[in-house]
Image (cartoon, rainbow, N blue to C red):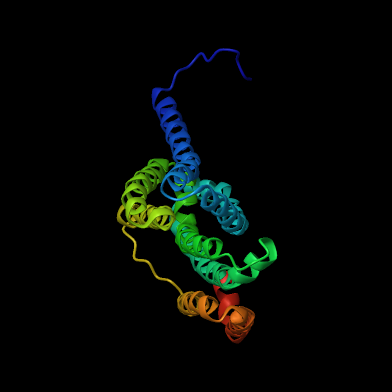
Amino acid sequence: MLYLFPYKWHRETFNEIFTYSVNLQLSSLMTMLLEPISKLMLGHYGNLSMVGLFEMANRLVMQVRSVIVNANQSLVPLLSNLHETEKKKVLGLYFKTTNILIVLSSVVYGILAVSLPFISELWIGELNIYFIDFSFLIVMGMFVNTLIGPVYFTNMATGDVIENTKSQIIIALLNIIFGIFLGIMFHGYGVIFAYASSTMVGSMALLYFFVIKNKIVLELNKLGLYLMGMNIVLACISFIVYRYYEKLYFFDLGISLLLNLLVLWINKRYLIAIIKG
């Protein structure tokens, strides 16, 4: 029976709920303010056209990121249940999720990075160097951020949201500091680099907090590391090629798709083993 007014007061329960909600709201606030602050600095140190192109580039990468992150977020109820019933299995699920995510993210973000010249011509009607460069920098930042996703959602499930808040505060502060300093030196590019690099540093800080607290050693699967390295090289080659040989970007995209599919096909048994855990 649910009473209109509580007749028992559990101070510890209230403190736990209050602390969780405050940290969750603060973390959400930091995330919400990140993009507008970057746009404000970009408008000051760059120009309005850069702001518009940043909006397009960021929206593109975030849409791709949301597909991966939302799938990962669905594990929060399961992790929360394991935390209450079988705590030892929480880290096991974290490692399994991370190993799957590094393979998926490496392929998806790698192909996205190589596809940027094609997307620019399709969406804008030309090879817009600002759109491609901005998108490339954001892809790098969000790739690292996506890989740390399991840590973020594990903390949400186990109640350690203060670590997530610390990470978001680090990202927000570094974005402002780097944005002003690099904006003065490199104008619009400096602001975008600050946005991407602060996201990377804050995400790595969250991973550091998680590793130290749980006293774990990270062990990433070889397939994921190989795909990551291969796609980084392909993305860098594509980034250089489109500047000097504009019409060859289709060739780069074809090679990227072919190599990723080939590597996944050759290692399909190993990939299935990773998924099955």
The part of the image, by quadrant, that contains residue 109 is bottom right
Rendered location of residue 65, percent (x, y) = 57, 57
* Residue 171 vs residue 50, the one in the foreground: 50
Rendered location of residue 30, percent (x, y) = 44, 40
**Residue at (59, 68) in percent of width and height:** 116
**Residue at (47, 48) in percent of width and height:** 83
- Which quarter of the image is occupied by the C terminus? bottom right
* Residue 114 vs residue 84, the one in the foreground: 114
* Residue 32 vs residue 236, the one in the foreground: 236
Q: Is residue 203 visible?
A: yes
**Residue at (57, 84) in percent of width and height:** 263
Rendered location of residue 100, percent (x, y) = 54, 68
Q: Is residue 93 visible?
A: no
The part of the image, by quadrant, that contains residue 41 is top left
Counting the numbered discs, the total is: 0
Q: Is residue 171 above or below residue 130?
A: above
- Which quarter of the image is occupied by the N terminus? top right
* Residue 239 vs residue 221, the one in the foreground: 239
**Residue at (54, 47) in percent of width and height:** 81
